[in-house]
Image (spheres, grey):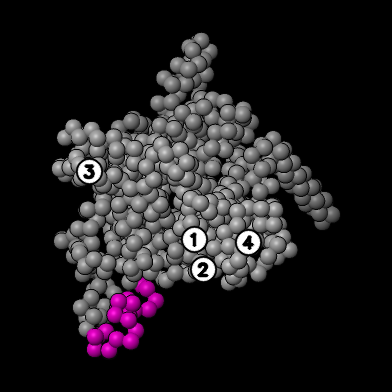
Amino acid sequence: MEKIVYLFRRLFYALFVLLGVITIVFLISHLVPGDPTLALVGPSAPRDIIEGMRTKFGLDRPLLAQYLYYLKNLVLEQDLGFSIQNQRPVAEDIWRYFPATFELVTVAMFFAVLIAIPLGVLSAVKKDRWEDHLSRLIALSGISMPVFWLGLLLQLLFAYYLGWTPLHGRVLLDVVARHPVTPVTGFMTLDALLKGNWIVFFDSIKHFILPGITLSYPSIALIARMTRSSMLEVMNLDYIRAAIALGIPRWRVIFKHALPNAIIPTLTIIGMAYSYLLGGTVLVETIFDWPGLGLYAVNGIFALDYPAIVGVTLIFGFFRVIINLLVDFCYFFLDPRITLESGV
Amino acid sequence: MLKALDLLDWRDRGMEYAYRLKEFRYTLRRLRHSPLTLAGTGIILLFFLTALFASWIAPHPEDAGNAVHMEAGFQPPTRNHLFGTDDMGRDVFSRVVLGSRISIMVGCIVVFISFAIGVPLGLIAGYAGGRISEFIMRAADMFMSIPYLLMALTVAAVLGPNLRNAMIAISIPWWPIYARLARAQTLMVKNELYVRSARAIGASNARILFRHILPNCLAPLVVQSSIQFGQAILTAAALGFIGIGAPPPTPEWGLMVSIGRTYMPDKWWLTFFPGMAIFITTLGFNLFGDGLRDVLDPRLRR
């Protein structure tokens, strides 16, 4: 019973944060100094056209009324407005571009966890030795690295000089043209796999390597540092010292006794790492011409397409809140010590 | 009687100074034993000195602006032009050196704004507790739910592309981090004896917060500021790269990478050196901040 109450409280709280995200994004886009209609029709447009536009977009009404109207449209009709770039509903565009970004972010998260956790463990076990210093350097380089620069260098080395990977894009167009993929889920890799279309599958895997690594590097740093500090904390606990004293092999103590307990705080940081990944897609997709939401938002900036930018920000905020909720749930099932009092 | 009290006071002060000296020595010792922290300190010093003496170090200071030497365009790195020349024949080394000033400005202003918004809110939340705290911290949660690069992007795009707006845009998503840290620290110290005595003798809330609580919260805030200084430079470069930061011909590092990108892969030096400057500078601040955290965190002491 307590568990169910706890889960509901988290769920309710997530909804509350979602509402907050919508509010913030609304305020950012509506408290603009200057008139958005002027940006749309130009400052020299006739007065009555400007007034007409203002009425059409509801900009002549009080802010609160605008907010309620915006909220109603968003919640009831998933209406994010019309894109200025292509006159299509932004919500439709977002659905179209979302799978590419989701795939990329998932692959990057996979890389990050795969590299970061061993790195963090190594760093904790060899505290203050050269292995620790090296892994600290690798980790801190990650949060110091301009991802756009890293992406360009990787392209230069692996795609241009060595020719091991494709330069950019999600899949080779002529490969898809010769071996068409029928969309089932919208996720190219998954669709190819489901249909047994190996040529497209491997081609798209090849395309994942560079953007995936580029995008994951900052998150590697976050996760590795967190793993290190929680491992250090756990390694000092009595039961670990007892295990070592009993003569259980060291690797067994580390991986069997310490790591499972140290991994729980690492879960929280994974929620934060998603934030880095989602923000990073804006840069990585620009460099690798990845047809996802990040590229869509960047194109939106140059077209002064506010509905598109705001829509992407909103979706990424939603995504982040959902990830946090999932992390909370995992936390809850993995750590029996969490009780109602420590919640929210 | 008065004299005895004075003496006691002096003794207390002496002990306090002795304690501070010990702390300081301990800090120095920890820093000395961590090569990476030292390297970070070195990088930061180098960075500040470069910015300070930029016009003397840069061989062609006029190249920061709109100078055009078409005949000298696209030279690869040589002894005359350490980092080569760009599409306008400007010396890339000079531009990178002069760009350090922009980075310093961005770092200082962004840290100042987010500190000035976040810390008072965090102090108030921690000290007042209850509904006020709930309100402030939930607002912080909401801000933190939006990926900060995207939020900066949205704000910068809405405000219009220039360096000033970019700095505002970078500051806004960051206040919650300061607010959280300040609140956590306030909660730890607000029941200490010195805070309670200050309240007992009738000090005002503002005085208690800023004279008594804030100085005792500073350590983690300083660490955060150092790390954020680097992150601000990195984010400003990212906005510059996308094209909504400093406008050309500003020698802003991210913008230089972005322009150089169009000449990839042949003219690699146009992207390589400005990007390297961003990387090394940010790394310096991160190494320093991370090392400082180890020193200041009493839980990690042996």
| Bounds of the magenta segment | A31-51
Q: Describe residue B52's horizontal placement relative to residue B263 as left or right.
A: right
Q: Residue furthest bottom?
A: A47
As helix, strand or loop, the secondary structure at mark 1 comes to helix
As helix, strand or loop, the secondary structure at mark 2 comes to loop
Question: Residue A81, how many percent across, how many down?
Answer: 22, 66
User: Earlier along the polypeptide chain: callout 1 or callout 2?
Assistant: 2
Tell me the amino acid under the disc marked 1: Ile
Q: Residue B259 carries which label?
A: 1
User: Earlier along the polypeptide chain: callout 4 or callout 2?
Assistant: 4
Q: Distance between the residues labelled 2 and 3?
A: 40 Å
* The N terminus of chain A, quarter of image: top left
Question: Residue B159, how many percent across, how many down?
Answer: 41, 71
Circle 4/circle 2 CB separation < 8 Å: no
Q: Which mark is residue B248?
A: 2
Asked whether the viewer can see residue B15, the reply is: no
Instruction: Choose between B139 and B202: the one closer to the eye.
Output: B139
The residue identified by callout 3 is A176
Circle 1/circle 3 CB separation < 8 Å: no
The residue identified by callout 4 is B91
Tell me the amino acid under the disc marked 4: Asp
Q: Distance between the residues labelled 1 and 4?
A: 14 Å
Q: How far apart are marks 1 and 2 (CA)?
A: 9 Å
Q: Describe residue A265's horizontal placement relative to residue A329 as left or right.
A: right
Q: How far apart are marks 4 and 3 (CA)?
A: 45 Å
Residue depth check, mark 2 versus mark 3: number of the one nearer the observer: 3
Circle 1/circle 2 CB separation < 8 Å: yes
